[in-house]
Image: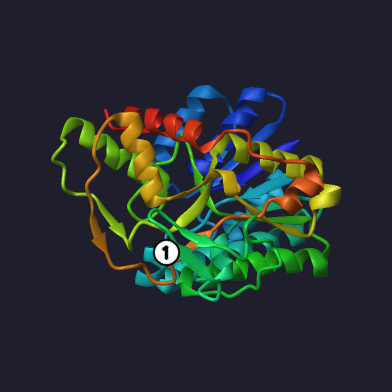
């Protein structure tokens, strides 16, 4: 098998690439424009561990991307390249659209032109469901609770694109679905909740679990650290999924393509691995033996009070379930964050 990963030097991409290199059974092609913080470091790390073909290419470049697809003819594409921050999409909607929407149709058209047998697995987002303000919420001391969806939200949740990021990712999401229906390209869409793990260079705008792990470690060195901020009251809830479980998921989707082709799946850690920001702080305080102090900022535009993925569909189709629980994953994330902060 030959795998091509767009955004292969990012967080998820480098974890998948590392797995392919470690197994030494398959060919690997990485496409990345190296624009994101940490991508060059991840590229160097991957090069130290094995051989692969690397192309420094922006997916907005239709012709260059087409030449790569035509030359490599991959069996599988993991399409992970994208603009990933809500805040960036608000600052520059045109850039956000050009990467997420235009870049995705560039890929799909080149697959259709040169390699229509290629399987395409796409990393989408829970933001395709909008702000979810129509959901009935309760509130306790640490989190919001959705009483009407005790197992999380399923794929039957109405699409409701909101914010430039939600619109651009939603557009790409639907093009993926449509290219299966209309052209027969075997696409699979994963609508992710929160992902975290090693090789993730988190920022205040993206990768909240990793970011707060980094911030919490600052209290170990300086108990009076005062630079931590959160948006809203900290009771927003997501289900978190560790990198190793994501890697298993992506390859399981390929192995079971007869079932997964043309399907979308809500993906996260599930209800048992859900956390609010405040609950994450509680775990970090216990693990690090610190007291976390923070300043509240206004709620971010289109922020969801809760998103927890109902995993019933993916479990029924390919029997995939997360194996790394949230506490174990956070301990691993703290170790990784501590290493990069040295």
Task: Point out residue 175 in the picture as x, y percentages from the top left corner.
Answer: 68, 68
Is residue 87 at least partly visible in the picture? yes
Q: Position of residue 82 (x, y in %)?
A: 51, 57
Return the x and y of residue 39 as percentages of the image width and height: 43, 42
Q: Quadrant of the C terminus?
A: top left
Q: Is residue 20 above or below residue 201?
A: above
Q: Is residue 79 left or right of residue 336?
A: right
Give the residue at x 72% y 38%. 2
> Could you classify mark 1 by the number of other residues whose Cα lies within 10 Å: few (under 14), some (14-19), or many (20 or more)?
many
Seen in the picture, residue 269 relative to 63 is either above or below; the reply is above
Q: Nearer the viewer, residue 184 or 15?
A: 15
Q: Outermost residue, right direction?
A: 258
95 left or right of 176? left
Give the residue displayed 55% in from the left and 71% down from the top.
Answer: 135
Q: Secondary structure at mark 1?
A: helix
Q: Nearer the viewer, residue 69 or 308?
A: 308
Locate residue 101: give its quadrant: bottom right
Evaluate whether residue 35 shows in this view.
Answer: no
Of 197 and 201, the residue lying toward us: 197
Which residue is identified by label 1? 86
In the picture, the quarter occupied by the N terminus is: top right
| Residue at x-position 60% and y-position 71% | 171
Nearer-the-camera pick, 126 or 184? 126
Q: Residue at x 75, y 46 (%)?
A: 315
């Amino acid at each position: 098998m030959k795998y091509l990963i767009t955004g292969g030097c990012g967080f998820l991409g480098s974890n998948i690439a590392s797995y392919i290199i470690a197994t030494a059974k398959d060919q690997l092609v990485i496409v990345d424009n190296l624009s994101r913080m940490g991508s060059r470091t991840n590229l160097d790390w991957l090069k130290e561990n094995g051989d692969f073909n690397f192309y420094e290419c922006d997916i907005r470049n239709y012709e260059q991307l087409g030449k790569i697809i035509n030359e490599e003819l991959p069996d599988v594409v993991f399409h992970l390249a994208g603009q990933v921050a809500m805040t960036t999409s608000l600052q520059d909607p045109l850039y956000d659209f050009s990467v997420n929407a235009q870049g995705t149709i560039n890929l799909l058209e080149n697959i259709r032109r040169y390699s229509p047998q290629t399987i395409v697995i796409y990393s989408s987002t829970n933001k395709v469901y909008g702000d979810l303000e129509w959901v009935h919420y309760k509130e306790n001391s640490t989190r919001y609770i959705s009483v009407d969806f005790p197992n999380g939200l399923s794929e039957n949740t109405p699409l409701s694109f909101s914010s430039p990021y939600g619109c651009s990712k939603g557009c790409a999401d639907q093009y993926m679905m449509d290219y299966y229906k209309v052209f027969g390209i075997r696409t699979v869409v994963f609508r992710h909740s929160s992902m975290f793990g090693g090789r993730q260079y988190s920022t205040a705008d993206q990768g909240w679990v990793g970011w707060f792990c980094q911030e919490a470690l600052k209290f170990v060195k300086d108990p009076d650290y005062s630079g931590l901020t959160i948006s809203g009251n900290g009771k927003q809830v997501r289900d978190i999924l560790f990198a190793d479980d994501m890697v298993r998921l992506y390859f399981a989707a390929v192995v079971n393509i007869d079932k997964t082709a043309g399907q979308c799946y809500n993906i996260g850690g599930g209800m048992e691995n859900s956390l609010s920001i405040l609950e994450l702080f509680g775990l970090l305080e216990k693990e690090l033996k610190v007291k976390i102090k923070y300043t509240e900022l206004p709620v971010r535009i289109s922020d969801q009070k809760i998103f927890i993925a109902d995993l019933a569909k993916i479990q029924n189709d390919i029997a995939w379930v997360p194996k790394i629980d949230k506490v174990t994953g956070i301990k691993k994330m703290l170790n990784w964050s501590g290493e990069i902060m040295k």
